[in-house]
């Protein structure tokens, strides 16, 4: 480059001598422009500003005349790393200038001044774009944050920053390019991931410590905040109630059935038809868990939908089927339930249900099964559509509610579970399943089953289950009481039907467990399938356990006000002979063969002798 004289040389002779009367080399002009842009010229002198503006326009005119010529490549090479674009009061880098910019974001981003439109051909050839991309706004926000150095933005700067964040949110690719700087509640720019947006407005002051969370500025909507990486306050509160962090879900413990679910579940439903057998499967699971009582309740009640873990859960706050038993999930039960029936129950021959394939028949009427057991509340979301943080690898959540105040933070979400003895304050000494019924809206979107269910639809299912109750109690291993209940829109749950079984006389109660103890062991010392088969092979046939007793069944129907009592003779045994030989064959070790036979005969009904056919 060449230096510029600080005087006005008007002598023709001197100009000729110095060679200033000839047109300068265009590459030299480009080098001079690059040097000029580095000078950082800022002046309040209107005359100087006008002269500089005129000089730049002449230079651009010269450059535009050689666009497409071989010389232009050299000009472009000389200028590409410099802030050579004139924006009216200074120079800017070409990547921070576009022909159209919908907001005044200078000096981070500038629009081509109107007086330069005449040189559009040159500017476009030099790489000036029509519009800025989301990535440009990301870069501009980072530059503004660096300039502010932790100071709050002035009101006009805040408006510009909010507008730039909104432009970034509209460009999904830009949201993934790196950290997006977002103004917090007081106008200080922070990385989006350090902020939360307030999607829990129902929480009163003092629901959490003031310095627990840093909130995004109120001028940013939740949708914009979520797109650029601002975190959900709801989800952060949920994090605090999780036991740990699952792979691929850094903010809550992922929990759920880990196969590709929707198609798998659709196939399972073809194997397990709709009907009362779904409730029979749940009752068998409870029996395998050594529960002594179960309750089925049809709820017609709709609960609030304001304070939920996610707005998408609102469609599951309506009518539901509840299934309660008084056994608590073991650690292995949680594992079994996530395996979609991979056969873990085969290790214990006494277990005919125990969260195998049959449990998944509940997806006939719901897409979001859940339950409370012990210290945990678990929700499954095979569509990964409703629960915050659910993924295809871990489509659900497990919440340890006894160590948090999450129940008070999301009252509408958890109020449906506060019944049948569950208060979500203390460890629950049982298991309460809640199966919210699939409504028309959810059914239309379901990839599992597109049939909606209503409370009236399940009345018939529950009634069929009720009729099976007395006979079932004769042969279940542990369950001695079954209740059917109803919860209407108003009032408390009421018992519609109840059936119970007891030994007659009561001192024979232990006989119920004679055979189950031999087959599956005790709760303190359970036995596996190989242990049972070994004991079966070694036991002489005459010493195999038997059970002969009298059982009294009492049925109470509150709708009719009637009570019925039946006495049954019950005989059961582990058989020897051919059945024993079949069960203990080595080639049958993968099968669930148990030589267990039972027979029941009705002796009387309401103290009247039964008539044998």
Image: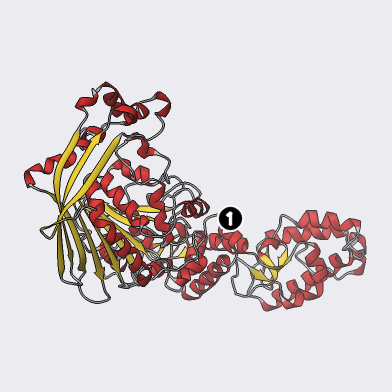
Give residue 80's position: percent from left, percent from top.
Answer: 74, 56
Coordinates of residue 429 in the picture (x, y in percent):
19, 51
Residue 371 x/y as whole percent: 31, 56
Residue depicted at 60% across the width and 70% down the height: 106
Asked which secondary structure carries label 1, the reply is loop
Nearest to the observer: residue 63 or residue 290: 290
Q: Is residue 519 visible?
A: yes
- Name the residue nearer the viewer: 588 or 194: 588
Q: Is residue 218 left or right of residue 92?
A: left
Q: Name the residue furthest front.
A: 613
Q: How many marks?
A: 1
On screen, residue 448 versus residue 174, left or right, reads left
- What's the residue at 35%, 39% (across, down)? 345
List the residue tagged with mark 1: 177
Question: Does 454 sit above or below residue 79?
Answer: below
Q: In the displayed structure, does residue 104 sit left or right of residue 232? A: right
Q: Nearer the viewer, residue 132 or 87?
A: 132
Q: Quadrant of the N terminus?
A: bottom right
Residue at position x 14%, y 43% in the image: 549
Colour scheme used in the picture?
Answer: secondary structure
Nearest the camera: 37 or 573?
Answer: 573
Q: Kindly tell me whether residue 221 is visible in this rendering.
A: no
Q: x, y percentage for residue 37? A: 70, 61
Q: Quadrant of residue 197?
A: bottom left
**How would you rate the neighbour count of disc 1 (Cα within 10 Å): few for under 14, some for 14-19, many for 20 or more?**
few
């Amino acid at each position: 480059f060449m230096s510029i004289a600080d005087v006005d040389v008007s002598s023709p002779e001197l100009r000729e001598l110095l060679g200033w009367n000839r047109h300068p080399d265009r590459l030299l002009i480009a080098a001079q422009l690059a040097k000029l842009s580095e000078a950082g010229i800022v002046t309040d002198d209107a005359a100087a500003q006008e002269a500089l503006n005129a000089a730049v326009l002449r230079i651009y005119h010269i450059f535009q005349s050689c666009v497409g010529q071989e010389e232009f490549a050299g000009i472009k090479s000389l200028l590409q790393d410099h802030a050579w674009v004139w924006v009216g009061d200074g120079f800017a880098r070409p990547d921070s200038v576009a022909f159209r910019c919908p907001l005044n974001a200078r000096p981070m981003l500038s629009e081509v001044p109107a007086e330069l439109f005449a040189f559009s051909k040159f500017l476009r050839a030099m790489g000036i774009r029509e519009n800025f991309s989301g990535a440009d706004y990301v870069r501009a926000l980072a530059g503004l944050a660096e300039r502010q150095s932790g100071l709050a933005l002035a009101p006009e700067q805040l408006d510009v920053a909010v507008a730039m964040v909104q432009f970034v949110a509209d460009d999904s690719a830009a949201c993934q390019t790196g950290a997006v700087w977002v103004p917090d509640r007081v106008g200080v720019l922070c990385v989006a991931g350090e902020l939360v947006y307030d999607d829990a407005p129902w929480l009163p002051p003092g629901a959490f410590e003031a310095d627990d969370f840093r909130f995004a500025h109120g001028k940013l909507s939740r949708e914009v905040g979520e797109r650029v990486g601002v975190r959900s306050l709801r989800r952060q509160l949920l994090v605090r109630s999780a036991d740990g962090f699952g792979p691929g879900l850094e903010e809550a413990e992922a929990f759920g059935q880990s196969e590709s679910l929707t198609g798998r579940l659709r196939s399972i439903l073809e194997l397990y038809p709709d009907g009362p057998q779904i409730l029979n499967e749940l009752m068998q699971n409870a029996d395998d868990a050594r529960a002594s009582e179960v309750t089925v309740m049809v709820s017609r009640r709709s609960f609030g939908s304001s304070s939920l873990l996610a707005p998408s859960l609102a469609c599951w706050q309506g009518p539901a089927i509840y299934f309660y038993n008084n056994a608590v999930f073991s650690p292995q039960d949680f594992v079994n339930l996530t395996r979609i029936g991979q056969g873990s129950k085969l290790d214990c021959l006494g277990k005919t249900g125990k969260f195998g394939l049959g449990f998944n028949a509940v997806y006939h009427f719901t897409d979001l099964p859940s339950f409370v057991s012990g210290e945990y509340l678990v929700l499954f979301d095979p569509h990964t559509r409703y629960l915050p943080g659910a993924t295809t690898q871990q489509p659900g959540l497990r919440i340890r509610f006894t160590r948090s105040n999450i129940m008070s933070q999301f009252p509408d979400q958890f109020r449906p579970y506060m019944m049948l003895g569950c208060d979500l304050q203390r460890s629950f000494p049982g298991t309460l399943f809640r199966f919210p019924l699939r409504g028309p809206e959810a059914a239309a979107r379901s990839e599992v089953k597109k049939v909606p269910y209503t409370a009236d639809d399940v009345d018939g299912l529950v009634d069929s289950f009720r009729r099976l109750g007395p006979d079932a109690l004769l042969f279940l291993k542990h369950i001695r009481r079954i209740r059917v209940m109803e919860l209407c829109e108003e009032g408390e749950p009421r018992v519609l039907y109840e059936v119970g079984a007891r030994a007659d006389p009561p001192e024979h109660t232990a006989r119920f467990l004679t055979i189950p103890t031999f087959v599956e062991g005790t709760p303190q010392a359970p036995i596996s399938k190989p242990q049972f088969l070994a004991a079966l092979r070694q036991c002489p046939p005459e010493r195999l356990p038997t059970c002969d007793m009298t059982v009294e069944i009492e049925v109470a129907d509150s709708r009719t006000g009637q009570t019925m009592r039946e006495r049954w003779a019950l005989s059961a045994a582990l058989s020897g002979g051919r059945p024993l030989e079949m069960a203990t064959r080595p080639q049958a070790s993968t099968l669930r063969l148990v030589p267990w036979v039972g027979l029941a005969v009705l002796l009387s009904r309401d103290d009247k002798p039964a008539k044998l056919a």
